[in-house]
Image (tube, rainbow, N blue to C red):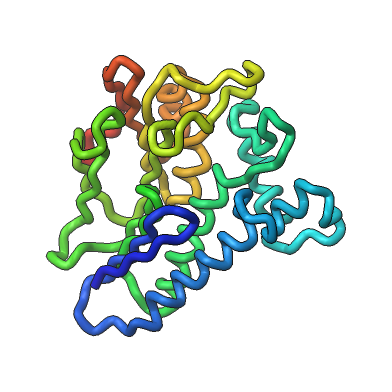
């Protein structure tokens, strides 16, 4: 069964093979994402992150989740040589480059704790994929052409992995190279990262995109990761082990 809701301004899809999946299972996952949106959305005046940015909430009053996310963001900044930075050019903190993958992974753990082994959770084309599909085969995941979203350029066969795509096409230019003040990253159009889970894939896809053409080399340097980048001229480059997923 597949269910979809619009949450955080994007489609949230949960697919669990089978015909008798209780509606309450899906709603438990959707409710979790709604709570994440209420806490971390920089577009909501009532969210915790907005109140932090406006100085309404002090550091000693941060929630446990916010402290954890900030800790993970700082770790990712160090691992990416500063290319992952949640401080925007305007000075506000925006951890969304990590929060989405972290939340998807947590939602997948909710399903696992409910006893499900086969499913995927997809939020805005970033997904955690577990087990097999309804045909007992690896899940088939398409990589879209960043210049034509109706076209699928590669089809991946994925099981028990995370897949994240970073780029500026869907939301406009919102990813920046922190080493060049106010300069948006535009050397590549998109980069898709396959990682051991969606949290890991998503948190490294963003800095890899910000690195431009060197981003694919960064993914190559990470153990247990593969990547597929398409540059601004439509030329694709993949890591050495990427083809095993095709």
Residue 186 found in image quarter: top left
Residue 74 position within the rendered picture, expressed as x and y whole percent measured from the top left: 69, 40
Q: Which residue does the image show at 83% across and 61% down from the upper left?
A: 61
Position of 240 relative to 112 (above/below) = above
Position of 9 relative to 135 (above/below) = above
Residue 153 position within the rendered picture, expressed as x and y whole percent measured from the top left: 20, 33
Please state if 46 lies on the left or on the right of 99 as rendered: right
Q: Which residue does the image show at 20% across and 51% down from the upper left?
A: 140
Work out which quarter of the rendered image holds the N terminus and state it: bottom left
Please state if 215 lies on the left or on the right of 60 as rendered: left
Residue 95 position within the rendered picture, expressed as x and y whole percent measured from the top left: 62, 45
Residue 243 found in image quarter: top left
Please state if 83 lies on the left or on the right of 129 as rendered: right
Position of 61 relative to 195 (above/below) = below
Q: Which residue does the image show at 52% across and 66% down from the upper left?
A: 34
Q: Which residue does the image show at 57% across and 62% down from the upper left?
A: 36
Residue 82 found in image quarter: top right
Position of 16 relative to 99 (above/below) = below
């Amino acid at each position: 069964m597949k269910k979809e809701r619009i949450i955080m301004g994007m489609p949230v899809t949960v697919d669990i093979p089978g015909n008798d999946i209780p509606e309450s299972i899906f709603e438990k996952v959707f409710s979790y994402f709604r709570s994440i949106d209420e806490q971390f959305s920089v577009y909501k005046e009532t969210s915790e992150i907005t109140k932090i940015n406006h100085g309404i909430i002090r550091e000693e009053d941060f929630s446990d989740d916010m402290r954890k996310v900030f800790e993970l963001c700082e770790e990712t900044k160090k691992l990416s040589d500063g290319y992952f930075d949640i401080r925007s050019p305007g000075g506000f903190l925006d951890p969304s480059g990590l929060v989405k993958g972290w939340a998807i992974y947590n939602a997948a753990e909710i399903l696992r704790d409910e006893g499900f082994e086969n499913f995927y959770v997809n939020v805005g084309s970033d997904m955690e994929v577990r087990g097999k599909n309804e045909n007992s085969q690896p899940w088939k995941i398409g990589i879209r052409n960043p210049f034509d979203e109706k076209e699928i350029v590669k089809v991946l066969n994925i099981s028990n992995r995370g897949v994240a795509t970073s780029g500026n096409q869907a939301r406009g230019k919102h990813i920046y190279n922190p080493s060049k003040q106010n300069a948006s990253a535009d050397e590549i159009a998109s980069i898709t990262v396959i990682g051991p889970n969606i949290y890991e894939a998503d948190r490294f896809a963003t800095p890899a995109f910000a690195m431009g053409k060197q981003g694919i080399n960064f993914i190559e340097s990470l153990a247990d990761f593969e990547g597929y980048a398409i540059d601004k001229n439509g030329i694709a480059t993949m890591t050495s082990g990427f083809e095993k997923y095709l």
